[in-house]
Amino acid sequence: MARPDDSSLAPHDLRIIEERAHRLLDEADGWDQFPVPIDEILGAADLQVAPAGAFDAASIIAYIKGKTAVAANAIKSAVSKVFGLYDAGERLIHIDTTVVQSKQNFLKLHETGHDRIPTHRKLFRLFQDCRETLSPEIADQFEREANNFARYVLFKGSTFGEMAADHDLGIRIPMRLGKKFGASVYASCREYARTNRRECLVYVLEPLQTGEGLVYYAEVRRIEPSPSFRLRFGTPIDTRITPRHALWPVIPIRRKMTAPLEIVMTDLNGQRHVCLAEAFDTTYNIVVLIYPCRALATSVLTAR
C-alpha cells in the first residue's frame, strides 16, 4: 500500500521553508561542499547530535531522567516509531545510528528543519513541557515542512536537478549524483523525478514478497512523476506490482539491476508511447525509472 503524502506543501508554505533552508546553507558556507557538510550545517544551527541516541533502553532511561512524566512517555512512545528526535529544550538531535549513513544525513537535516522553522521550535518546546500533544493535522504539516527543509539542504536547492539535466535520462544518473550529495538512492531517485524538466516517472517498491502459490509481488511505496510526465500521462494509481503487471519483467529478481526494457504506456489523450523502464534493488526498496522514448504511429483515441 502506498505511503501517505510526505512532501506536498502549498506554494506559499514551500517558499518560506526553502528560504529558511537557503539561509542555513549560506550560514554554513555549504553550497560548494560535497557531500552536504552535515557538521558545518549543525554548527551553524547551533545544534548537537546526542553522543548516544535515545534508541536503546539504557539511553532512554538516562535521557528521560528529570523529564516530566508526560514528556518521558512521549519520548518512549516516539522511539518505537521513528529514527530521529528533536529536543527543543536541550537543542539536541537524537539519531538512530543503526541506519545507513545517507539515511542519517537526511534525518539530521529533517530534525534541524524542526529547529530552524520558528513555529516548530516554539510548539515543540511547549508540548514537551505540558500535557498536550500536537494534533495529527499539525504534526503531518510539520513533518512535510521538515522533509522539504531537509530536501532543499541535502540537494542544495536546484543544484541536483541542474546537474542531472546535463545527462541523458537513466537510473544510474541519480544513483551517481546521490553519492556526490550524500543522499540515498531512494531520496535521489525521487528528487530526480520531481525536479526533472523531462518526462519521467519513478516507482518505489517495497522488497519482493511471496504470496499464495509462492508467487512474488511487490507493494508500491511511492510513485513520483516529473511535472511534465504528470501533465501528459497523469499519475499511476498502482498499489501492487504482480507478474501480470506490465512492469514485472523489469523487476530485478536475484540481481541488483535490470537493463532498460521497452514497455508501452498510454497518455491522457489516448496516444500510446514506447517507454524505457529500468530498475535497481537497493535491498531496502526497488526503484524503477520509466521515461518515454517515442510515440507510436497509431493512436487509440477515438474522435467524437
Image: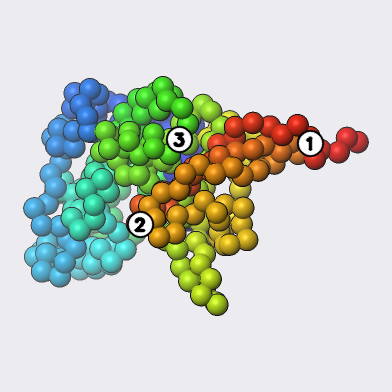
Percent x, y for residue 133?
34, 59
Q: Could you tell which of marks 2 and 1 lies nearer the N-terminus?
A: 2
**Quarter occupied by the C terminus:** top right
Q: Which residue shows up at 14% across the image and 47% down it?
A: 49
**Alpha carbon distance from label 3 to label 1:** 27 Å
Q: How is the image coloured?
A: rainbow
**Mark 2 burial class by Cα count in 10 Å: few <14, some 14-19, many 20+:** few
**Mark 3 burial class by Cα count in 10 Å: few <14, some 14-19, many 20+:** some
Give the answer, above or below, for where 73 lies relative to 147.
below
Label 2 sits on what residue type?
Tyr
Label 3 sits on what residue type?
Gly
**Alpha carbon distance from label 2 to label 3:** 20 Å
Percent x, y for residue 23?
27, 25
Q: Could you tell which of marks 2 and 3 lies nearer the N-terminus?
A: 3
**Label 3, on which residue?**
170
Helix, strand or loop under label 1: strand
